[in-house]
Image (spheres, rainbow, N blue to C red):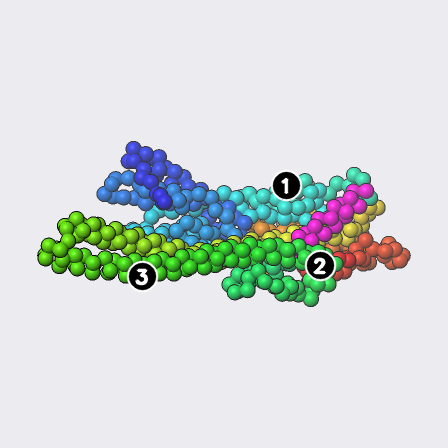
Amino acid sequence: MVFYRAIPVSSLGLVIGLIQAASVAVAADRSASDYLLAPQDKLRISVLHWLPGAGNYQEWTALNGTYSVGASGTISMPMLGSIRAQGLRTDELATVIETRLKQRAGLPAEPDASVEILEYRPFYVVGQVERPGEYAFRPELTTIKALAIAGGLYRDASAGASRERDRINARSALENAQLELHRLLVRRVRLSAELRDVDSEDIGGSSAPLVIPTELAANEDTGRLVRDEERIKHARMKGLASRLAALRELQRLLKNELVSLESKTQWQRETLGLAREERDNIAKLLERNLVVNSRRVSTQQAIAEHEARLLDLDAAALRVKQELSKADRDMVAARADLRATITTELQTTEAGIDLSQLRISTAVALLAEASGASTSGPAGRPQASIGFRTSFVITRRSDGGPPVQVAADENTPMLPGDVLNVLVETDALSGVAVSDALQTGIRSAAWPTAAGSDDHAAGAASPAEGLRHSWSELAIGRKQ
């Protein structure tokens, strides 16, 4: 495998220019926000190493490329393995790569590594905006720019039908996210069971059913999902068992062949001994002129043939032993390959669970907003005749800690991963009460319950009355 290639001195100016340009880009980003890397960030990494004796650069082509920070906060690079990127600046990550490459490759000096952010993790806009949802982050983003990206404040064209459509879409997105989360949770149980069973001696036998947590068992979709995952587990374990059984049968046949070869070898050795005794007897008789010389020649030829057959038998026995050793290695490799596949799928499933929980969180806020927990007006939207004011609240998670809410104004800088909640409050008392209910519901990451409006006082059912499930119930995918 080629990990690097040399760059001629004639191209040295271009290479240095590219390195300087990348360094300037990284320095500009760092000076703007001193940004710390986090999951979902996409990076471009370039590594060069100067060879004074050869007068050119080595370009580490196997390391250069695009990398994404995974859900665990790490990137995986050839030869260097897993590197923790979360919580580091780009220059700090470049230093880590340089140090590790120097140690792994045994270089006399640290190489030059540059890390450039190609794509930041997305940010989210919820609340009274035209198009709430997920958007790609860009540098120098502020709250007012994020509001513009989301289409500005909500404009009431046909409020009743629009709100009902938004509510249906939000509930559909929420149910899909719940079902996906539920499916991933059951899959995680199946993968964990496979990881335990892969080293079992009774692979392919009657396996115990998947042990599903009580919270998941309460869901009506659990039975179907569990059956699907058990079929996958059974097929995978049966495939491994079939492969191991074939290898064991091959070992049995090879051992029988080896026993047969050893028996033939023993017989051939005895025959060779008898032929040599006959040769010695003929030699004595030949000294007395009792036999002709041709008899001795034929005996010598027979001895040579016996020795050749004995060598062939020894070579065949060695080949069989090699095949037995290979069958042993294949049995170990079969388990190891399946274990590696299961581990990779388990990591992907864990990342999918995190993403599903994030989608559920966004869908909760969107459904609450679409269900009428907003400001007052004929359709629950702010009316120009009443007058309203806009406020911003940013929910931000810093370096893996708990989410923190930050009051913001129009020019507050935003960071990747932020959730911007745009609130519109009217001067009417009822509108302020409902807006407070919306803020309380979204900020507590639970289903909101609107109260205090004139409609509720009259005994009408609130659109948010059915949204009182706790976040823990939502996370395990229970249906209303």
Q: Residue at x 39, y 54 (%)?
A: 323
Instruction: Inspect the magenta stretch and tell me whether residue 165 lies in it.
Output: yes
Q: Which amino acid does label 3 sit on?
A: Gln
**Which of marks 3 and 2 precedes in the sequence?**
2
Secondary element type, mark 3: helix
Q: What residue type is labelled 1?
A: Ile
Image-based side of 32 in relation to 427, left or right: left
What label sits on residue 266 in the rendered view?
3
Q: Residue at x 88, y 55 (%)?
A: 460
Instruction: Give, as a single range, the part of the protein colored magenta.
Output: 161-184
Image-based side of 162 in relation to 180, left or right: right
Q: Residue at x 61, y 59 (%)?
A: 190
Secondary element type, mark 1: helix
Secondary element type, mark 2: helix
Closer to the camera, 480 or 33?
Answer: 480
Q: Label 2, on which residue?
A: 223
- Give how far apart the Cα atoms at labels 2 and 1 are: 43 Å
What label sits on residue 149 in the rendered view?
1
**Which of marks 1 and 3 precedes in the sequence?**
1
